[in-house]
Image (tube, rainbow, N blue to C red):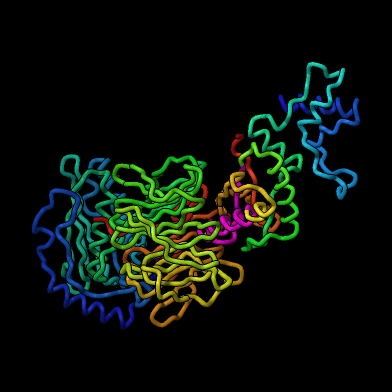
Amino acid sequence: MNRRPLDLVSASLVAALVILALAVEPAALDAQPPPSDTGLGSQDELTLVLEPGQRSLLRLAAPPARGTAALPAAARDAVKTLEDTLRSDLDLSGIFSIQGPAELAAAGIPGDADIDLDLYRSLGNEILLRSDVRSEGEQVVYEGRILDLESGDQILGKRYRGGPDLARRMAHSFADEIVLYFTGRKGVALTSVAFYSDRDGFKELYLMDYDGWNQRRITGHRSTTLSPDWSPDGQEIAYVSYFGGQPGIYRVQLSSGAKSPVVTDGSLNASPAWSPDGSKLAFARSVRGNTEIFVSDLASGTLRRLTDSSGIDTNPAFSPTGREIAFTSSRGGTPQIYVMDAEGANLRRLTFEGDYNDGVAWHPEGDRIAYASRRDGRFRIAITNLVTSETHLLDLGPGNNEQPSWSPDGRRIAFTSDRGGSHQVWLADATGARPIRLTSEGNSWAASWSAYPR
Amino acid sequence: MKRISMLLVCTVLVLMLPLVAGCAKKKPMTAAPEEAAPPPPVAQEVTEAPSPTTEGDVQPDPLSEDIQSVNAYVYESGLIGDVYFEFDRYELQAEARNRLQKNAEFMKAHPEFVFSVEGHCDERGTNEYNLALGDRRASAAMAYMADLGVPESAAQTITYGEERPVCTQSNESCWWRNRRAHFVITARR
């Protein structure tokens, strides 16, 4: 937990919250009971924009839900899952410092007690997450409220109802609403991450929730399968597999599991990357032993070659607008990141530090790129600001850290690290703070973060 | 079992008939490595070596075995060998060119075999770039052999980047073994 003393910045924030809280519809919670696990409409007015690491964390007290004791066992387990997930989501968001049930109990506040706002405030908290639960038949009903501890006003309230198996989903939905309220951007708790792993023997594609839960295999090619890239609409993943002999590019429809080839002729087709409108794939293709960047128009199947250099050109990525493509090229002697417009013109070099740069990922806002940069023999994640051309390295810890992928809100970064002796997918704040490991079985590589679910 | 019995036959042949050269299998390059010319086509030797004591137990031509056995045989006998590369490079060193000349000899002498030339990399580069680099290595090896007269139809190239390492430790002796072009017979015409 990153607890920091209440400082002037957060004191003024509390003042701002008090004012804003008055503007919030106080009856939001009870306005319209939803028939399912979805929220009670979204809170989409922009309030405060907080960035992880840019200010003190907002201090949140999260006591245990009230009403748990009266629940049947299955519902009680579901509520525990929901509460644990919600606290984890809020912690991962990077904007809260949380006192959960354990910390509150240690401070002498018993669980499931009447709310005494002064007591929570006396521990330095600024806001309170109040949870009430009950069961309706087989379903769990969760009511979550965010209260401003200064005024006692309710800032946000949502009710969710669903079967016990939807506990994590209910938590993610509420967490995203809370993050939206405090940052103006929806949280990423309902997003997913694709990667490839050798945990079952062959290298295959897997999916997991953004927090590492629910890891499941989605290919069974029993070959070598690599390089997932999530389509912008979240419905498909493009990838590379050797099951046809040579490495070819395929796509899998996630709802049906149906796989189909995209480009499979020739000795090498690799590193697929979707255009933001989902109509094209950029990729690397070998032309007589020399890889060049191509684009495939998915509707017509036509290929267009964009580069023509004697060096290696590979690993392309469309900019968020779709107007540019960044990629890796060794045309200058060492692998470096270049950018060109989506038709292949206006080529220029973006990276000048480090003797080996690869794996470019555009920030969702398009103003900066992340990539792996070898420094003193070790790969680190570097960020280059495309406006100022300044580059800095993230301090993500030991080992080689590479293959960055941004969360759709740009506040988190997934990457591959080999610290500890095996390759695993890790997650950290976009500042590089708080790296946590998401995978542990076998080796896992090449996280591709999904867009927001539709 | 097959391999053991073959070894037995070989041993017997060596003991009884020192002239038989068919046992290159377990003993490449003993006394004078510089002089050791590539073994002549083995098929002939074997048929030339019917021994009274091994009558009815004729040694099979190792090149007529199943593909997997042939692949093991050509590597063990030194008829075919891997070529190795510097880190992040695909240029052929002198040693690699020597090796490719021998590989080319065999491939030209045995047009019945279809080869795959695999490009591999060590784990230190990035996965995606290494796929491209492996493609370069395989193509560089194939281009050199084409200059020596190996027809394009004799082989196709494939890159595995760092995805199928032969050695998985993180040290130079292991990395070196992974930076290679590897030859695999994939079919017999």
Q: What range of the chain is rendered magenta?
A: B115-142
Q: Percent from the top left, x then y, of residue A256?
A: 30, 42
Q: Residue at 44%, 48% (x, y): give it.
A: A264
Q: How many marks?
A: 0
Q: Quadrant of the C terminus of chain A?
A: bottom left
Please say whether residue A112 is visible from this viewpoint. Answer: no
Foreground residue among B144 and A325? B144
Q: Quadrant of residue B134?
A: bottom right
- A98 over A299 or under it: above or below: below
Foreground residue among A454 and A338? A338
Q: Percent from the top left, x then y, of residue B185?
A: 63, 40
Q: Percent from the top left, x then y, of residue A60?
A: 29, 67
- Look at the image and say whether residue A373 sits in the magenta stretch: no
Task: Tell me if B23 is positioned left or right of A401 in this view.
Answer: right
- Look at the image and say whether residue B123 sits in the magenta stretch: yes
Task: Tell me if A349 is positioned left or right of A319 in this view.
Answer: right
Q: Residue at 73%, 51% (x, y): give it.
A: B101
